Amino acid sequence: MAKKFSELRARMRPEAQLQAEARTESMQTSIKLQALRKRLQVTQASLAERLQVQQAAISKMESRDDLLVSSVMDFVRGLGGRLVLTATFPDKTSFDLTPEPVKLGRPNMAVSEKPRARIRRPRKTP
């Protein structure tokens, strides 16, 4: 017999409920980035070209559980927009937390794939 999700959730440990909630929120963020790109009728490949990264970096960004603000800023900038970050509190106070865009000759490391560190091994002497 099928069980209601609310019954299954009620049986979960509180930690497991929090983890499930966090995972759901992160998945919604990923879906939102992908939906935003698709709504603007931009392909991953063309966005990658605009940001000077590989298409795989865009795909990874859209599927990550947790993103850097700078990554989202780059993503939105690549779509022609500007990200605005605001913190709002219960007393209706709000603060603009939008960071200034970094102007580099190459894309932000948050968007591009991290370079692999080179490990130098000492040479063996005969």
Image (cartoon, rainbow, N blue to C red):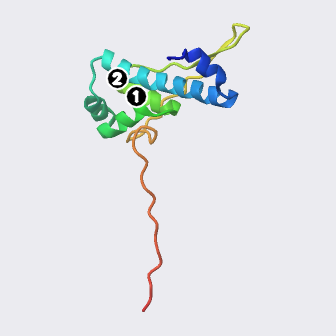
Furthest toward the bottom, the residue is: 126
| In the image: residue 26, left or right of residue 61 | right
Q: How many marks?
A: 2
Q: CA distance from mark 2 to mark 1?
A: 7 Å
Q: Residues within 10 Å of mark 1 (few under 14, many from 20)?
A: many
Residue 77 or 88: which is nearer the viewer? 88
Residue 79, relative to residue 121: is it above or below? above
Where residue 10 sits: x, y (%)? 65, 20
Q: Position of residue 39 (x, y in %)?
A: 32, 15
In contact (CB < 8 Å): disc 2 and disc 1: yes
Locate residue 113: give its quadrant. top left
* Above or below, comparing residue 48 to residue 25 in the picture: below
Residue 34 pos. (x, y %): 37, 23
Q: Amino acid at mark 1?
A: Phe
SS at circle 1: helix
Say whether residue 31 is left or right of residue 52.
right
Residue designated by label 2 = 79
Q: Residue under circle 1?
A: 75
Residue situated furthest front in the rendering: 1
Q: Residue at x 44, y 35 (%)?
A: 103
Is residue 80 in view from this perspective?
A: no
**Residue 58 on image: x %, y %:** 35, 34
SS class, disc 2: loop
Closer to the camera in the image, 48 or 101? 48
**Residue at 26% over, 32% down:** 45
Q: Horizontal placement of 119 versus 15: left or right? A: left
- Residue type at mark 2 is Leu
